[in-house]
Image: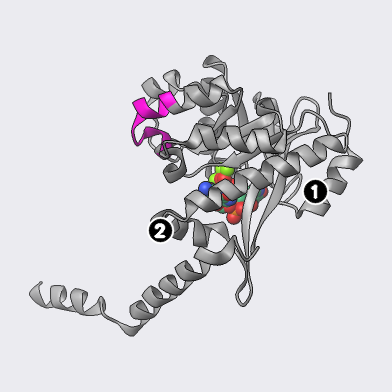
């Protein structure tokens, strides 16, 4: 046992780990300048109404075009951006860029499209969040009613009473609120009932095997029923095939997002898709 402990601690100082640490430090210092150097960009993934079959929204998804490493996934750098606090300025850039783009699409005749933007826990805890959102809306001219902010359960539950206050401020501005990755955090239904949110997004881990796994199907149905009874809309994320699409439709899900319809698209590609289907109400 003692020997095992020694070995465990010894393992802690392997060159591989040192390499990992310096890799992270290096990445953090690059990340610091990434926005200024215009290495950040947004891709947009369509969200489709199951009732009309039309695109009713898009989610803005952050990409980092690193000069040497190529395209880096947010899964890799968002945690680092959170730890270093860089997520605050980066997140503000995301919101501003997404609102400007959505307004550009509006000017091209794509009306009523919802722009969904992810907010991290750190951003959500910022005192001036509502003011920052207000500024991004005012500067872009984008309608607050078409902006949707995505929060995770864990971000909202960190200090739920405070969250309710911030959510109320955002709701008062007309912004839509959506709970992302629903079912993966710990859900306190007492709070969920009190959160002034508009939508739940069923996490894709429950959607993946919904056609073959009875438990996942039961969970998806339960989330849809929960949303219904709380008068919330519900979107299934990660819908990759017709089977998943049909199941969500049959069970009364409102919207889907996923590779079955489209992967996240570069801005020009998304513009083409939106204009080709620009029959919005
Ligand atoms: P998310 O908000 O849950 O976004 C959905 C993720 O699922 C995206 O990954 C998207 O590309 C992926 N996805 C969509 N449809 C499918 C599908 O059919 N199959 C599979 N396998 N995947 C699908 P992505 O773009 O890599 O983003 C990962 C996560 O990074 C996001 O998860 C979100 O939590 C975070 N993120 C992305 N952009 C931002 C941002 O601007 N700010 C913050 N704070 N977080 C962001
Ligand atoms: Mg999201
Ligand atoms: Mg999600
Ligand atoms: Mg997810």
Point 67% across, 38% down: residue: 139
Label 2: which secondary element? helix
267 to the left or right of 137: right
Image position of 67 with respect to 48: above or below: below
Label 2 near label 1: C-beta < 8 Å? Answer: no
The dot on residue 134 is none
Viewer-proximal residue among 79 and 231: 79
Q: Crowding near pointer 2: few (<14 within 10 Å), some, many (20+)?
A: some
Q: In x, y percent, where is residue 260?
A: 74, 46
Residue 209 visible from this viewpoint: no
The magenta region covers 155-165
User: What colour-coding does the image apply?
Assistant: one colour
Label 1 and label 2: CA atoms lie apart by 32 Å
Report which residue position mark 2 lands on. Answer: 84
181 magenta-colored? no
Report which residue position mark 1 lands on. Answer: 270
Tell me the quarter of the picture where residue 241 sits.
top right
183 to the left or right of 13: right
Viewer-proximal residue among 172 and 193: 172
Point 52% across, 16% down: residue: 230
- Give the number of the mark in front: 1 or 2: 2
Farthest-out residue, bottom: 15
Q: In x, y percent, where is residue 55?
A: 78, 35
């Amino acid at each position: 046992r003692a020997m095992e402990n020694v070995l465990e601690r010894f393992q802690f100082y392997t060159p591989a780990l040192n390499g990992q640490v310096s890799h992270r430090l290096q990445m953090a210092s690059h990340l610091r300048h990434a926005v200024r150097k215009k290495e950040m960009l947004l891709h947009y993934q369509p969200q489709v109404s199951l009732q009309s079959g039309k695109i009713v929204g898009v989610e803005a998804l952050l990409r980092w075009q690193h000069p040497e490493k190529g395209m880096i996934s947010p899964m890799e750098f968002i945690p680092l951006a959170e730890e270093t606090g860089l997520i605050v300025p980066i997140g503000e850039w995301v919101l501003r860029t997404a609102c400007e783009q959505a307004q550009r699409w509006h000017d091209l005749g794509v009306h009523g499209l919802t722009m969904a933007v992810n907010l991290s826990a750190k951003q959500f805890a910022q005192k001036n969040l509502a003011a920052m959102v207000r500024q991004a809306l005012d500067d872009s001219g984008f309608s607050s009613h078409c902006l949707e902010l995505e929060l995770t359960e864990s971000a909202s539950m960190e200090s739920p009473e405070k969250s309710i206050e911030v959510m109320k401020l955002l709701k008062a501005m007309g912004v839509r609120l959506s709970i992302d990755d629903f079912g993966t955090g710990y859900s306190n239904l007492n709070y969920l009932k009190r959160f002034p949110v508009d939508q739940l997004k069923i996490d894709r881990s429950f959607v993946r095997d919904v056609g073959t796994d009875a438990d996942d199907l039961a969970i998806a149905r339960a989330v849809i029923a929960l949303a219904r009874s709380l008068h919330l809309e519900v979107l299934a994320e990660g819908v990759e095939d017709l089977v998943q699409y049909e199941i969500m439709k049959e069970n009364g899900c409102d919207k889907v997002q996923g590779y079955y319809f489209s992967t996240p698209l570069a801005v020009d590609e998304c513009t083409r898709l939106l204009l080709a289907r620009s029959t919005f109400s």
